[in-house]
Every structure is written in C-alpha cells, then in structure tokens.
Image: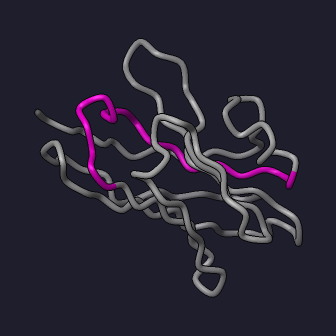
C-alpha cells in the first residue's frame, strides 16, 4: 500500500512561487504515474500535472508554462514547482499515484489509485 504525504503549501501573494513536495513510501512498481491535482472550494478536483516512470510529463492548460512537475527517484519524492501564482490557483493540492495508464487520464479523479491528505495553497491578490 502506497502512502503519499504532501508538504510545502502556504500563503503567497500573486506573482509569487511555491514548491510542493510529495514523499512516496511503498513500491509504486516499475511502471507508474505520479501526479498533482487540486480542488478549490465548490469545485471538482482536477488533475493539473503528471509524470510517469520514464519522466514524461503532462500539464493542464491552466498551469502549462507556470508549473513544473519533477521527481527525485533517490528521495522517492515528486515535486510541483509553481511560479507566477494567481489567485485562481488557490486550492487544496493533492498528490496522487497510479499505474502508467493514469498519466493518459491524469485530469480525471478516477485515474488515480492512491491519494495524499492534501496541502493548502492560498494566493492573495
């Protein structure tokens, strides 16, 4: 059973940056997908970034060019570097894991097998 623990959330002004971390414990297998989703109050959870075991990445249009997903295999950690933050980025951010096929459907809640507890990001104008 995988466990995912997020950290790095906080409050920042518009235009600022944050880096989220997700520590992964357990064996994700040789072929896997890790990703980040977010959920704003009153809205559905949406996948925003994903990275597979080969290092291929995918992004939602809303964050493309501003956010970067990466992984450190030695540290079993996946990161989300968020730059040029906007008030619309305010949400609870969740780390998620799945098999390699999860990356093809990363925008969907049902793509993922395991979730972290989330970390709050608040961007003020």
- The furthest residue to the bottom: 74
Residue at 74% across, 41% down: 112
Magenta stretch holds residue 45: no
* Residue 50 % position (x, y): 65, 52
Magenta stretch holds residue 89: yes
Q: Quadrant of the C terminus?
A: top left
Is residue 85 toward the left or the right of residue 39 in the image? left
Q: Nearer the viewer, residue 6 or 101?
A: 101
Rendering quarter of residue 45: top right
Is residue 96 toward the left or the right of residue 64 in the image? right
* Residue 58 % position (x, y): 66, 50
Residue at 49% across, 46% down: 64
Q: Which residues are magenta?
A: 83-100
90 shown above or below 35: above
Is residue 79 toward the left or the right of residue 55 in the image? left
* Residue 23 % position (x, y): 55, 67
Q: Quadrant of the N terminus?
A: bottom right
């Amino acid at each position: 059973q995988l466990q995912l623990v997020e950290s790095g959330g906080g409050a920042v002004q518009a235009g600022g940056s944050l880096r989220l971390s997700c520590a992964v414990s357990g064996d994700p297998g040789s072929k896997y997908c890790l990703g980040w989703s977010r959920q704003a109050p009153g809205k559905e959870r949406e996948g925003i970034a994903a990275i597979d075991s080969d290092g291929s990445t995918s992004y939602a249009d809303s964050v493309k060019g501003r956010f970067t997903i990466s992984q450190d295999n030695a540290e079993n950690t996946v990161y989300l570097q968020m730059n040029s933050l906007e008030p619309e980025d305010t949400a609870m951010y969740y780390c998620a894991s799945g098999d390699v096929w999860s990356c093809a459907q990363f925008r969907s809640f049902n793509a993922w097998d395991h979730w972290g507890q989330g970390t709050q990001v608040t961007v003020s104008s």
